[in-house]
Image: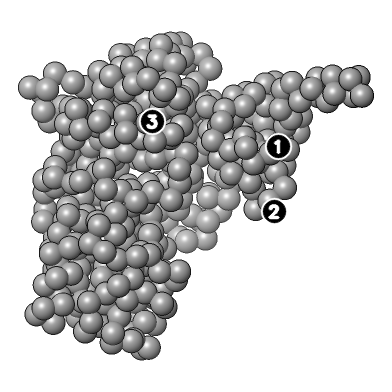
Amino acid sequence: MHEPKTYFIRTYGCQMNELDTEIMAGGLQKKGLTPAADEESADLLIFNTCSIRDLAERKVMGKLGRMGRAHKRHQIIGVTGCMAMAKKESLFRKFPHLDFVIGTNNITDLGPVLDEVLYTNKQIVKTDDRFEENLDYLVAQRDNKIKAFVSIIRGCDKFCTYCVVPYTRGSEVSRPPASIVEECQKLVDAGYKEITLLGQNVNSYGKDQPEWNCLFHDLLYQLDKIPGMERIRFMTSHPIDITRELMEAIRDLPSLCEFVHFPIQAGSSRILKKMHRIYTKEQYLEKVDMLRAIVPDVSLGTDIIVGFPTETEAEFQETCDVLKQIRYSLAFIFAYSPRKGTPAMRWKDDIPEEVKLDRLQRLTAIQDEISNEERARMLGNTYEVLVERFNKDGKMLKGRTRCWKKVIFEGEESLIGSVQKIKVHSFSHETLIGERVGKRQQLLTLSNSI
């Protein structure tokens, strides 16, 4: 086995995984490796995995199985992320061609593990149950030069009965505020326009370190003071932990976008209790009413699971009613799938797959109608759009509003990375189509001068 010169990381799952990949990539480049163009040409291949959804896990398992049948022995292969935490050493039994397994709490060990694999020629596993706040976040190798993810808290203490995150990422560990402010300052100085603060539950930030006297809303006020800070987003928010102070920060801080991902998961209080979400439907609706009273133009996103064990048709209808009542701007809707190691795994998965699919389609249809009506109401209005890149055909510029809507419009490459005012005139599917404000007047002025 030769020392690797190139690497390739295949990332599955959430934004936290994407950030972990950027940190690992930065560490590897610091070690002297260069990125490969694809999986086949890389000396070192890493699968940074997700266990939240069954589909993501099956994709990785299938990929690893195919690689085992046609494995090039000179290639070092490792698995990191949530699947590494969930399966640990058992991955070696199923895939003997694997060289190392590193859990979510051990990505700082990638370099030493790689050295150990090379010099001992043994399979190495590192999967600590608790995260130690020792990551070098500043080494992260980001491909996107306009938007950046910044981790502020890792792990989760909520233990929802369907979720593996508390078992794969451990308990909540907040990152020191000075470290977060330093990283964000460097990103702004480097020209980044939008920063998304990440955590399994950002609303819990600082609660595990009361001596800091810095909760999530306190951190946001610090970050907003950074000169040149254009936009701040955050995800994800657990409804039980959102506070009036956080809502007021969304209202008062110029850099903070008016979009909150606020997962309800189900519209039935009985199902919510079975999920161990710690709130009732009525309590959730009270939080939404408070948020909308404080921030009238706020947009909400959500996650919803249909077909949870014992969910009745009447309880599913409650979820439909909540969707119609709240009118989310964005909804990620999933059919329940049991995850090994969770409390819900002990219960009978008693909702037939065809019923789950039917409920999924019906709820998606409701959300599609709501989203189309919202986009129709946006026609004729002008919005601030952060211009990110050209769209796939290379003819239109693409960006997002503060409330997370995709927008395309005609423009020059020089506009990428800037914030433009766009007047929306139409939409196609989920994308708004508009025109730069002032462009027509500029053309008329030019015509008159000729």
- Judge depth for marks 1 and 2 and give the one in front: 1
Q: Earlier in the sequence, mark 1 or mark 2?
A: 2
Kindly identify the residue that appears in the image at 12 percent across and 30 percent down: 208
Q: Quadrant of residue 138?
A: top left
Separation of marks 1 and 3 at Cα, in angstroms = 24 Å
Disc 3 residue type (three-letter):
Val
Instruction: Give the x, y percent position of residue 110.
Output: 19, 62
| Amino acid type, residue under disc 1 in the picture | Gly
Name the residue beneath numbered marker 2.
Answer: 393
Determine which of the numbered discs, if any, sits on residue 188 in the image. 3
Where 114 sits versus 97, above or below?
above
Does the image show residue 315? no
Mark 1, Cα crowd under 10 Å, few <14 / some 14-19 / many 20+, is some
Counting other residues with Cα less than 10 Å from the Cα at mark 3, is it few (<14), some (14-19), or many (20 or more)? many
Residue lying at 15% horizontally and 59% vertically, measured from the top left: 109
Badge 2 or badge 3: first in the primary sequence: 3
Query: Gap between marks 1 and 2, in whole Å?
Result: 14 Å
- Crowd tier of the residue under label 2, counting other residues whose Cα lies within 10 Å: few below 14, some 14–19, many 20 or above: few
Image-based side of 415 in relation to 286, left or right? right
Q: Is residue 349 above or below residue 318?
A: below
Image quadrant containing the C terminus: top right
Q: Disc number at residue 411? A: 1
Residue 99 point in image, percent of width and height? 21, 76
Residue placed at 51% from the left, 13% from the top?
A: 296
Image x and y of residue 386, in percent: 55, 32
In the image, 317: left or right of 59?
right
Residue 206 visible to an observer of this rendering: yes
Secondary element under disc 2, as helix, strand or loop, is: loop
